[in-house]
Each structure stands twice: as structure tokens, then as C-alpha cells.
Amino acid sequence: MPPGPSAPQDEWAPPLGATLDRMGLAHVIAPDVAPERADYIVYAPDSGLQDFTPFTRARAVLSLWAGVEAIVANPTLTMPLARMVGGGLTEGMVEWVTGHVLRHHLGMDRHIVNPDNDWTLRPPPLAAERRVTVLGLGALGSAVAQALARIGFNVSGWSRRPKQMPGISCYSGDTGLAEALRDAEFVILLLPGTRATENTLNRDTLALLARGAFVLNPGRGPLIDDAALITALDEGQVAHATLDVFRREPLPQDHPFWGHPGVTVTPHVASHTRPHLGAEVIAENIRRSEAGAPLLHLVDRSAGY
Ligand SMILES: NC(=O)c1ccc[n+]([C@@H]2O[C@H](COP(=O)([O-])OP(=O)(O)OC[C@H]3O[C@@H](n4cnc5c(N)ncnc54)[C@H](OP(=O)(O)O)[C@@H]3O)[C@@H](O)[C@H]2O)c1
């Protein structure tokens, strides 16, 4: 377990050790174990670890994060790579997206900051009258789409391969993107950061949305062409963008997103792996590996996610 800001040894070692104990798996969890003696690498992408060559006997890299763009193309990584699915990530993302969608859907800002004590009655539409599109129908996107559909929103989704999900209009592939976005009033980006997904929201695709749409990006910064988004905001094509992820993080102080009245910046807080839950996912994969069973949540390195 290499040290890193998001995976301090004292936060992860106790729950992981307790779970491995419960599974009857003998272990030593250490940040500074000699690389050639490590059987598994529990990996945080911000740990700084880049060279996997010295880990000659490691059987797998088990990432604590869902997004793997920092490691997926690493040529020194020759062992299987599993990413985090579960561990509290899904619940956290559903809560963040639902909260920010409802903020805009209900027009909450108008009432929270109301210096003139305005009493104009402007009831919001019902959720069923709102078209919401979720780009990415994986572990997080599918849970978000289903949660919004349960509230009553009219939900569409888009994925690389065709999918069927009860209550969701599903589109896929390059041709499906325009259909998924056309007239959408909310767009939620939950795609991985890959070469194929860069600038998915650009001048042309933003123009497909309903005028005055809301954009939520808890996926990855490069999914959006920043300049095109600012133009769309300035022209009223997009009413508001709530952004959790950016091309550079922390978002530089002089970035126009900070001061733009149509942008809410949240500092990559949409969803985090919780050690007491994530430990179960990591330990289960170690148990499987030791038993010769296939690992869960393996990354498809040719697809990049
Ligand atoms: N802000 C945060 O705090 C936070 C926290 C966790 C995760 N994230 C981000 O959320 C992303 C999604 O996580 P996840 O666990 O849901 O990932 P996932 O299970 O791998 O799902 C990814 C989805 O994107 C689709 N996709 C990938 N490439 C595509 C393409 N070229 N065209 C159309 N669809 C494409 C996939 O299609 P298929 O279904 O056909 O494969 C899949 O539906 C992560 O990669 C990470 O960047 C952010």
C-alpha cells in the first residue's frame, strides 16, 4: 500500500486488516514493504507511484478509485488492474447528483438568497415534465439514472455498448449521442476519462440541448470543452453548470469557472471511497485471487476504463 494523500495507512489499514482477518487471510499491510515482497498493491492514483517494475511478484493492483485514467496506459503495469466499484461510491454519487439536480429543478437558489423578500409564485414543473440525460450507464451512471427515474424524471442514458434498463430510454454509440442529448434539460456526465470521451460536450453537442439546460459534471474534467461551455452559458443555451471535476485540479484560482455566475464549483467531492466499505471490496478481490477465482471489476485496458 504505497502512501498517498487519499489513502493514509492509518485510515485504510485497520478496516482492511480486520476484513482480511475475518476472511482468514494472513497479511502484512505496510506502506514501505520491499516492492519485490508485495503480493498485492492497494493503489491510490494520487500516491505518486508510477513505476511498477520493482513489484516483481505482485498479483494485482487494486485501485481505491473508480477512475483509472492515471494508470491505465502505464507501460510498467503488467499485472491485472481492478478498480473500485462499491465502497460507498455509488451511494455518494447518487446523493450528490440528486441534490444538485433538485436544486436546479426546484429553483432553490431563488428562495435561499432572496434579499427583496420576493413572493412571486412560480411553481416548478413536476419531475415527469423534465428530460434528464445521463451520459455513461456504468456502475455510477446506471444508479443515478434509476434514482432520478424513481423520483419521476423522464430519464435517458447513453453508453458505449447497447443496454436495456427498465424505465430508462437507452442510447449507445456515436449515433446515439445526438438522440440522447436532443432537447435534454439536464445532462449528467458519468463517463470515464478516455481519448474517446474527451470533449463529449462541445459546441455542437451543447447546441442539441434544450435552451436553458443544466449541466452537471461529476465525471472527469476533459469530458467538457471548457471554452464551449462558457460560451453556451454566456449565450443562455446553458442556464447553469455544476462542476465537480476539472482538467486541472485544484481548479486554478484564475480559471473563469470560479467567478462565473452560471457555474457552481465543487472541489471533487461528489463521491469518495469510504475505507470501512472499500476494504470489503479490496479484501474480496484478494480472497478471490488467493482462491484462483477471477477478480471483480477488472479494467479493460484497451478500452481505457
Ligand atoms: N467526482 C467524483 O467524486 C467521482 C467519483 C467516482 C467516479 N467518478 C468518475 O465517474 C466515472 C464513471 O464511473 P463508473 O464506475 O460508473 O464507470 P463505469 O462503470 O466504467 O461506467 C462507464 C460508463 O461510460 C460508458 N462509456 C465509456 N466510454 C464511452 C464512450 N466512448 N461512449 C459512450 N459511453 C462510454 C460505458 O459504456 P459501457 O456500459 O458500454 O461500457 C459505461 O456505461 C469514473 O470513470 C470517474 O471518472 C468521479
Image (cartoon, rainbow, N blue to C red):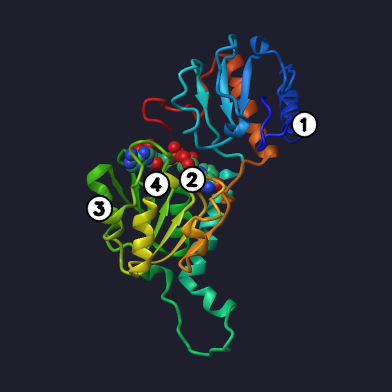
Q: Around disc 1, counting alpha carbons within 10 Å, would you say few (fewer than 14), some (14 to 19), or many (20 or more)? A: some
User: Quick one: label 1 or label 3, which is nearer the N terminus?
Assistant: 1
Kind of residue sitting beneath label 1: Pro
Gap between marks 3 and 2 measured at Cα: 22 Å
**Foreground disc of the pair 3, 4:** 4
Q: Is residue 300 above or below residue 160?
A: above
- Disc 4 on helix, strand or loop? helix
Kind of residue sitting beneath label 4: Leu
User: Quick one: label 4 or label 2, which is nearer the N terminus?
Assistant: 2
Residue nearest the observer in this picture, 124 or 63:
63
Disc 2: residue Cβ within 8 A of ligand 1's nearest atom:
yes
- The residue at which mark 1 appears reads as 14
Residue nearest the observer in this picture, 270 or 236:
236
Q: Around disc 2, counting alpha carbons within 10 Å, would you say few (fewer than 14), some (14 to 19), or many (20 or more)? A: many
Mark sitting on residue 85: none
Q: Is residue 39 visible?
A: yes
User: Quick one: label 3 or label 4, which is nearer the N terminus?
Assistant: 3
- Disc 1 on helix, strand or loop? helix
Number of numbered discs present? 4
Q: Residue at x 30, y 41 (%)?
A: 162
Mark sitting on residue 223: 4
Give the image location of residue 134, x and y in percent: 39, 53
Kind of residue sitting beneath label 3: Ala
Gap between marks 1 and 3 measured at Cα: 48 Å
User: Quick one: label 1 or label 4, which is nearer the N terminus?
Assistant: 1
Q: Residue furthest front?
A: 254
- The residue at which mark 2 appears reads as 140
